[in-house]
Image (cartoon, coloured by chain):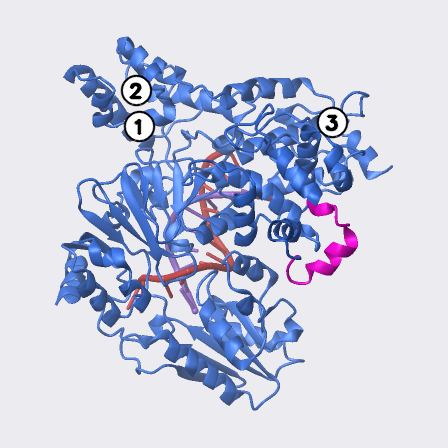
Chain colours: A blue, B purple, C red
Amino acid sequence: MSEDDDFQTTPCLPLTASLNQKPTSRRKHNSSPAISSPPTFTQTIHSAKKRRPSPDVTENNLAILSRKQCKTFVHAEAFRRTDPDLISPKLMDTLNERLPSNSDTASCNFTWADKKVYAYLDAVDSYSMESRLLSSSTGEGGEGGCDGLFDNEVDGESSTQLDVLLRLCSDPDTDNFDHGCLVVECPLCGLDISDLNDESRQLHTNACLDKCDTPTGNSPHGCRRPQILEQVTEKSSVSTSKQVDVAPVIEWLHSLGLGKYEDTFVKEEIDWDTLQWLTEEDLISIGINALGPRRKIVRALSEFRKGVDQSSKMETDDSKHTTDRTNNLAVNRLITDYFAGSSIHEKKSFRNSRGQSMMEKSQSNSAPLWAVRKKRVPDGGTKTIPLWCCIPGTPFRVDAFRYLRRDCSHWFLTHFHADHYQGLTKYFSYGKIYCSLITAKLVNLKIGIPWDKLQVLPLNQKISIAGVDVTVFDANHCPGAIIILFEPLNSKAVLHTGDFRFSEEMANIDALHTCPIHTLIIDTTYCDPQYDFPKQEAVIQFVIEAIQAESFNPRTLFLIGCYTIGKERLFLEVARVLHTKVYVTAAKLRVLKCLGLPEEDMQWLTTREQESHIHVAPLWTLASFKRLKQISSQYSDRFSLIVAFSPTGWTFGKGKKKSTGRRWQQGTIIRYEVPYSEHCSFTELKEFVKFLSPLNIIPSVNNHEQKSSNAMIALLTS
DNA sequence: GCGATCAGCT
DNA sequence: CACAGCTGATCGC
């Protein structure tokens, strides 16, 4: 039996079964990865990899196909291949030029999703889509060794075909074309799933996969449209409709005895999402001027926010809930139960063993039902939000995913370090996450946050978010780290540094000279005069010289510590200066590829460990001699000496000798502690505060009590 | 068994 | 101690 035959005989399961049951023996027989419920996107891709949309459709006859066939091919092909989930800036630029883009430049999520399709296509083949797109747009050959393959593999027509493809996909005169956005169709049933988010698309595709039967004559993909799919489609059409769903809001309004404002809410298209962040000013602006009803609504919203802290079990009925939208409706109905006078369902409060209430009943608007029902939702609602996570004069939170609440829909993430994104999971449904492109890529790659929840903030460009001017600058911390300047309407500018290290470039930022800072929220990690460590350059030089000095033994393995991201500069400089490749694991390379490092840096990396005697390793593995001894024993046949470098500012702590590095040795293991820091030294902190002269300072680290906060502020301003 | 949270550790 | 992030215990589903 061929793979396709095998696939086609996959038994029809109800969608709920595919979501909630253990893998079927058929899937196991397919040698797909074991699929627990629900299947992941990767699993979907693995399954979809086995089929093409139509035996007649190939890359070489795209030009003669209808637009729909063409797009179906593209999307199916994207699913069929392994997910790289990445798109290079250069390809992005080309696509931006050549594909119709969303007119709102601040909101690239929809076009991103579609452009990712091309990135998928690009990923596997060495004669890449990227090289073809680039070559067809610039008139040059593809890059980096692709040319030959490209020329050999595809004749001169190929770029023309891609032009045709792009034109077909962006033809505004055809159905499904929506404001310049590409249409995403299910590769199996051809249904337009553009408006569904990634998870819903995945669910939809899985439903199709589960339902695929023996090809039936007319069906272009050999996929019989099953009954359950009709249900999904029907429900989906509700969610994909351009009309705003105000029904739950109206229901809620009536429960407050304020039904007479129904028309106003309908006219203003206030759906459940909007309701949650409605302010009193908003109510006035939409004409609810009378004090009584206004206060009633404000009170009810406030009760609702408190209600989020309480917990209650969600009633579920698997058979009735198959899509986001149905999930949404179910959840929405229950949300109204929080309000006085509308209780239908019994509220059950429960606490976990640590005495924390569980927000089991999520108000998720986008998490699939299984996520809402099965996953524990972080209990952000009960914790007090620290001062340094809130931006005065704005409705924004920064690095506050530990304190998730429905009263906020704008969540900024300064950089991708665990202590800043803690609490963020792929089921995040509290609005938008604002961050740099690098951070967005990492959040998508490592946590699985879909692109439609991520808003990329361009560096050095002022943009308006919820009426607040926001500008972000490079923080000189880890790659993708930003400092954020908020300029609210009250003119009291707030600068949030996230984690940062003051640099010359930062001192040259115009906006920081021209905009008086009212409140400075500052990274006070090393806010103590004892931390007066050297510049990074000096430490890098020290490490290079140490490696040279220890290299007399050719059987020496050098280990350089790093975080998931961070400290890259150290090992890249070592490689560059010593003209030696450094070894990184494949996983580490995937992360490094998100960082947009220049090719001259990337060329020093290798994933073949035998190619290098300088290895990059997680910092924690170098923290103790015990660990290092384990590593040493693994390499005993190749290396007789291990020299490890632990780069951290803590090296410079109390009572420690002030130098660019300290050397420790136990037998054949040498460990250097070097004060390579990506945070400001105390001196730099003071310089930065002097440079900005802010009216208020809010320390963001070691600020657990007023006393320590005051002490730090005194140190910084003295 | 999976995923999330937390304490403890480096 | 922190940094940043791992391990292992525990919990709910």
Mark closer to the observer (3, 1): 3
**Mark 3 to mark 1: distance in Å?**
43 Å
Disc 1 to disc 2, how far (Cα)? Answer: 8 Å
Position of A36 with respect to A562 (left or right) is right
Residue type for callout 3: Cys
Q: Quadrant of residue A468?
A: top left
The residue that appears at 49% across and 30% down in the rendered structure is A373
Judge depth for marks 3 and 2 and give the one in front. Answer: 3
**Answer yes or no: do the residues labelled 1 and 2 have beta carbons within 8 Å?**
yes
What chain letter is assigned to the residue under label 1?
A
Measuring 50% from the left and 29% from the top, which residue is drawn there?
A179
Q: Nearer the viewer, residue A1 or A261?
A: A261
Q: Give the mark nearest the N terminus, 1 or 2.
A: 1
Q: Residues within 10 Å of mark 3 (few under 14, many from 20)?
A: many
Amino acid under disc 1: Gly
Viewer-proximal residue, A503 or A68?
A68
Residue A685 versus residue A450 in the image, above or below: below
Farthest residue toward the front?
A: A139
Disc 1: which residue: A307
Mark 3 vs 2, N-terminal side: 3
Asked where in the image residue A267 lies, by quadrant, the reply is: top left
Assess disc 1: are there few (<14), some (14-19) or many (≥20) residues with their C-alpha within 10 Å of its C-alpha: some
Which of the labelled discs sits on residue A212, or is there none? 3
